[in-house]
Image (tube, rainbow, N blue to C red):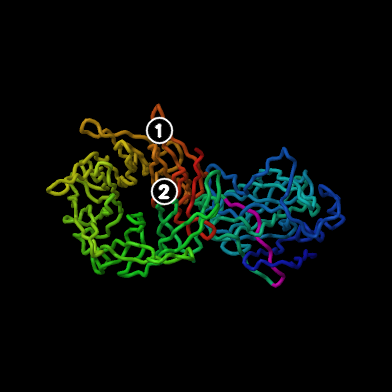
Amino acid sequence: MNIPRLISLTRLVPAVIFVLVPAVVPAGAQKVPATAREAATLPQVAPRLAHNRTLPSRASGRAHGPSCSPLPQLYGSQKALQDGLIYDNGPYNGTNDAWTINFGFATSDSFTGGSTVTGIQFVYWDASSVDLLTSVDIAVGLSSFGGSFQTSSSVTNTFLGTNQFGYNLFHADVQFPGASGGPGYVTLQNACSTSGCSVSNPIYWDENSGIGCTSEGCPSTAYENDLGSIPSETFTLTGRGGVSVCMPEESGNFKVIHDFSGQDGANPSGVAINQAGDLYGPTQFGNGTVFKLLKAGSDWVLSTLYSFAGGDQGASPEGVIIGLNGILYGSAYGGIPNCESGDYCGLIFGLRPAPTACLTGSCSWSENVPYSFTGPTDAWQGRGLVSDQAGNLYGVSPSGGAQENGAVFELAPSSSRHWVETILYSFTGGSDGGGPTTLLFGNDGNLYGMAAGGGTNGGGVVFQLTPSANGWTEAVLYDFPAEPYGTNPHSLLQDSAGNLFGIYEYSPCCGNTYGLIFMLSPSDGQWVFTELWHGDEQTYFGTDLFVNMTIDAAGNLHGTGGGHNGCLDDNEHGYIFELARTSDGWQYSTPVSWDAYTKFPTGGALALDAQGNLYGTTGSCGSHQHGTVWELTSTQ
């Protein structure tokens, strides 16, 4: 039996390798080269190519086709309606090489994610435009070349263009009954074309080296044998239990301005902005850091201001705000130990620059702790800081206070640099609410906030705290409806007219959960509730939630959101939204919206600069999957 040889490779990619092995060779099979590039030099193949000329030893650039032929910008953009993306090994190359998947040869590529694989999309090279793929054997297994083969004749071919070797490139969308998913390997063999399955009709699987691959586990890997290694192929797997890919680096006016590597921090959570347009924020990886992003021309330069030491000195910073004199304040895990079930009580930290001028642009800041909470009936684990014009800090404790149902606290600076804490209000968990989540210092000097529990309906409240000679008096402005999964109220805002805006969640049926943006307007001593927008209940997504929100000087709302299909694991989609005031009311739009199976794990505070550019963070995504800081440039 004459088995084709595997050619030696001058270029090895140790981390990305696939092996061609002989399967069952048809009787009378002729010698067929293992790669398309080698075949193009042979007299029996060269006349069948789209052009017959001297071939370059190595060419760069992408495949090209007629101007009327649609060329997908990103391979893997086509997705089955019923099934989701499981794994995407990046865009096709079309100019490097391709590997035989018929005449006794099989090619096996690894993948991650998914519970059931029902389809594969890949790019193949073909010597003739009339030889389209009609069937192929597919196996999915736990090991390379493992699993039971299924023959699929459900193939849709799309012409992509012709490369410099004379091969026509086609995108094949192949559906099959399904097989157990990953992590594992997918293997292709016994490809047949419209001219039959004979040795004169070779089909080659495009090699792409995994460049541009964004799925978890990218690029696809296998193992190296003593004959060399083969870079990974172009393919996308679809099925049930798909995994999402992260948002792109750029999309219209959206771009990533910092991509965390892990060495400079990871898992950022929100940003704050000063009048100069500098951004500040916390990261959560390890004990956590606080960073600064300074714009230098068209670039942004990150410096780490402080790295937390952990333990009683603090860790996992969150909710960074800019106080008087540019001092940064936030809350952190740490402080007094053994507060509740061995936990820390939590602390409020302050960060300030060194008293001498920083000449390098990367000087560390020093930490002081204005207050460490003392116990469960104090405002332990206090967070959600806001400040007034005098520099006093205010925040909420979700489960502290006299009744341990939550509290609102104040921290006032003193001349000795120690701060004085006052519990302004302790919730009972009854009609006054419980478990406060967010707070703001109002234009009128009152405090406004939201609580996730208590109230008339048990779904939480919007509350007001008014100062008086005898302390602070609470009033409930609105009772959230009772929801089986909780209302999760957050992102409370106020415009110049005193209107309040916020977000909560509701579950109308069957476990589906949607976000709702509302406005509370003062009118004759009462507060009028208006629903401005809610999540899309008409889609197949089981959730459509609003994550965070901010407000500009004109009173327009800007925020982020996303959804998840309850029927398909990890089927996520994300977007940035705007609710703009118009003469007729409010107009909702999504300046940036990604398709299903694209994660947008945004979180933490958003920030707007003087030009109307919006900034935020993702806790993951980016080149290193450690999170990003992003910018949406204003079009106004």
Q: Amino acid at mark 1?
A: Arg
Percent coordinates x, y for residue 187 in the rendering:
64, 58
Q: Foreground: 101 or 148? A: 101
Q: Give the structural element (helix, strand or loop) at label 1.
A: strand
Identity of the residue drawn at 40% across and 59% down: 282
Residue nearest the viewer, comparing 615 with 108: 615
Q: Amino acid at mark 2?
A: Ala
In the picture, measured across the screen, residue 256 lies left or right of residue 476, that is right
Over which residues does the magenta segment extend?
226-237
Residue 138, given in percent of the width and then of the height, sits at: 63, 54
Q: Is residue 263 above or below residue 233?
A: below
Q: Main secondary structure of the magenta part?
A: loop
The number of numbered discs placed on residues in the rendered structure image is 2
Q: Quadrant of residue 416?
A: bottom left
| Farthest residue, direction front | 356
- Label 1 belongs to which residue? 581
Question: Dividing the picture into quarters, in which one does residue 514 lie?
Answer: top left
Instruction: Tell which of 7 and 427 is nearer to you.
Output: 427
Is disc 2 placed on a helix, strand or loop?
Answer: strand
Task: Name the residue beneath numbered marker 2.
Answer: 607
Asked if one can make out residue 212 in the rendered structure from this viewpoint, the answer is yes
Residue 553 image offset from top left, x and y in percent: 39, 40
Answer with mark 1 or mark 2, whichever residue precedes in sequence: 1
How crowded pointer 2 is (Cα within 10 Å; few <14, some 14-19, many 20+) is rated as many
Q: Is residue 375 magenta?
A: no
Q: Position of residue 217 (x, y in %)?
A: 55, 60
Camera-side residue of 330 and 360: 360
Q: Residue drawn at (54%, 42%), measured in percent from left and top?
A: 81
